[in-house]
Image (cartoon, rainbow, N blue to C red):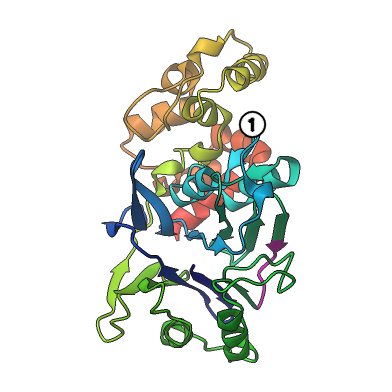
Amino acid sequence: MCTSITVNKNKTIVGFNLDILDMEWRIRNDDRKGIYIEINDAKEGWMPLFGANCRGDFVGMPTCWPFDQRSNPTADEENIINLDIDLLLQKKTLQEIRKHVENNPVCSVAGLTFMGALSDKEGNVLHIVPGQGFIYYERPEYTVLTNFSPFKKDSERHPWMGLDRYEKAERMLKGVKDDFDVQDCFEILKAVSQEACPTEVSMVFDVSERTVYWCEKRNWEQIRKVILKEDHRNIGYCGIDCFRCDAYLATANDDDALREKTAKLWSELNQTEILPEQINCQGCRFEGKKTFFCDQLCEIRKCAVKNEKDTCASCAKMSECGVLSKIIANNPEAKRNLDEIKR
């Protein structure tokens, strides 16, 4: 079942009730990456399907009732579960997933329509219903998603569709004040919690503070709290986000076509031959594979390693560096990333 809420006032606050029956679950806390609610799948084992990450994303995945057979896999569609996990584990950004669903069909598992209730650190929200479509909200005042399709609304009835929960949450959210906070969100989650298909976990994410609060089995007096520590290792020495780099994506997805495309482009830009088989990288500040360029040719990386700098943000000569200025000229986001780390 489940209820997912996002509110953008003075803060971005995300709330989620996990309502499940006869399924094994657990909370996994990795304060360097996120707080995940994992489900034990008979084939896949423990899968991180819901929760928050240190980047500021949140994933909820309500089940759509009634089931819509259009969500059944038929060919090469991306499964909604994979998209949700990719956001939660920071393999993709919300905007990358949005772009994907704009151009590609999405499916669920056979016989069950899972939906995506996804948000990012800016408070943008993406609701995905496999087989039906998606709705993107740019920093909405609030959104609610329960267990009926926002495309069908109440045109098809089902005992578990959660229309009552939706209407109750909407009434409580209309006109909320600018100081809407964690406890206010818990009050809504408490009001829409379930017993028949029991609410096992109620989680609230204060995105601005990167702090996750949760309680288990509707025990509202025992709320736990974890502050997520921002892990900037995905930001390369020069400020480029390695997780968005084509070399990293080609490696993570074992995409030979992207390797060939990247090798050709990098060969032209650097006026040296770079082969597709050299496009294997797990991030320039992580242990593991590096591209030939990152390992042997990148002057920024050589300088940072030699001078024991985590990134260029900790270098007093950052604003004067000619090599860095060329990178920033082509990648303005790199400068923004370095400024954020410096702050």
Looking at the picture, tell me which residue is in the foreground, 246 or 131.
131
Q: Is residue 211 above or below residue 279?
A: below
Label 1 Cα neighbours within 10 Å, binned few <14 / some 14-19 / many ≥20: few
Tag 1 residue: 76
Disc 1 secondary structure class: loop
Task: Identify the amino acid type marked 1.
Answer: Asp
Q: Is residue 78 magenta?
A: no
Q: In the figure, is residue 27 to the left or right of 170?
A: left
Q: Is residue 20 above or below residue 89?
A: below
- The picture places residue 108, in percent across and down from the top left corner, at 57, 47
Looking at the picture, tell me which residue is in the foreground, 309 or 72.
72
- The picture places residue 182, in percent across and down from the top left corner, at 43, 82
Q: Residue at x 44, y 54 (%)?
A: 341
Q: Is residue 3 above or below residue 255?
A: below
Q: Residue at x 29, y 68 (%)?
A: 226
Q: Is residue 119 visible?
A: no
- The picture places residue 193, in percent across and down from the top left corner, at 43, 80
Q: How many marks?
A: 1
Q: Residue at x 39, y 48 (%)?
A: 314
Q: Is residue 192 visible?
A: yes
Q: Is residue 139 magenta?
A: yes
- The picture places residue 208, in percent across and down from the top left corner, at 47, 71
Q: In the figure, is residue 159 to the left or right of 197?
A: right
Predominant secondary structure, magenta span: loop
Looking at the picture, tell me which residue is in the foreground, 34 or 110.
110
Q: Is residue 287 above or below residue 85?
A: above
Q: In the figure, is residue 342 to the left or right of 10?
A: left
Q: Which residues are magenta?
A: 136-141
Q: Quarter of the image holding residue 5?
A: bottom right
Looking at the picture, tell me which residue is in the foreground, 159 or 116.
159
